[in-house]
Image: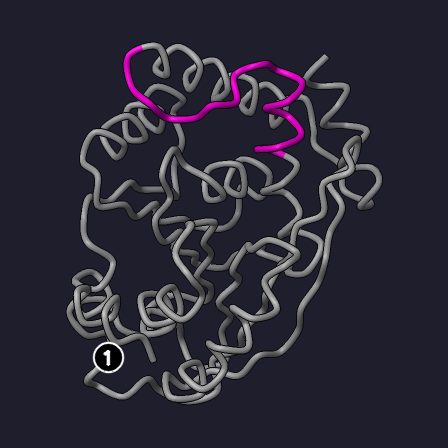
Amino acid sequence: MMNEILTAGLAEWNRVANEEQLAQLEDFFVRVRETNKVMNLTAITEPEEFARKHFLDCASLLTVQDFDGLSVVDVGCGAGFPGMPLKLLCSTCSVTLLDSLGKRIRFLQDCIDGMGLTGIEAVHARAEEFAKAHRESYDCAVSRAVARLNVLAELSLPMVKVGGLFLAMKSKDSDDEIHEAERGIQTLGGTLERIQDITIPGTEITHRLVLIRKCKPTPARYPRRFQKIKDQPL
């Protein structure tokens, strides 16, 4: 059933997943579900719901950006979303899964090793510290993290190359959040390029993709310490 849902959903976006990709997605689902018994990774464990609310939700990124051959950092990846599905559906991109919780990263590295994946790594680090060591190193940053956009932008945009993109996955009622982040985005060298609302196939759920283009280098003082980012957002 999961494969049928994914195949039909991707077809609505003129995307095709081959048998190997579908098998890998199902393999990852099984690993998440099994590990979820001893570690809190997700509240979604039924195959059909997982296919729609995790896999197709993450695959919506492919409707606004071609990731072939690009380097991508998934900021605050949690249980591997959206970075892991993105890699499984676009094998030619290279992905760094970044999270500050060590047990999640150990789980993801076990998945990477157990599934024999290449061109993807799981890194245990705080985003603001990792960003300082990897300034303007990635073609794209993506995030489905729950932090507000002004916080996510300061954690993510410093890692993006000039000309690259930061793609934030937000709720459809995020207008105020986007507006409050615009000045900070400009300060960080970015510009709000596009907002795209996407309905997940097979559901009535509409999510929002916020595309931020990196137009100039991020000033060296950013990102700041996380507590300062949180207490005094741009």
The image position of residue 141, as x and y in percent, is 43, 61
Seen from the viewer's position, the closer of residues 194 and 65 is: 194
Image coloring type: one colour
> In the rendered view, does 233 fall on the left or right side of 170?
left
Instruction: Give the residues in magenta.
Output: 38-55
Q: Position of residue 227 (x, y in %)?
A: 17, 65
Q: Is residue 44 magenta?
A: yes
Q: Quadrant of residue 89?
A: top right
- Circle 1: element type: loop
Residue 219 percent coordinates (x, y): 27, 88
Rendered position, 24 above or below 123: above
Residue at (38%, 64%) from the top-left corner?
A: 152
Question: Is residue 70 depicted above or below 201 in this figure?
Answer: below
Please give left or right for residue 155 compared with residue 178 in the image: left
Tell me the residue at 56%/18% (across/down). 26
Kind of residue indicated by mark 1? Tyr
Residue 36 placement: quadrant? top left
Q: Which residue is mark 1?
A: 222
Task: Give the quarter of the figure containing the C terminus.
Answer: bottom left
Above or below, 88 against 13 in this view is: above
**Residue 222 part of the magenta segment:** no
Depth check: 170 or 138 in front? 170
In-front residue for pair 46/25: 46
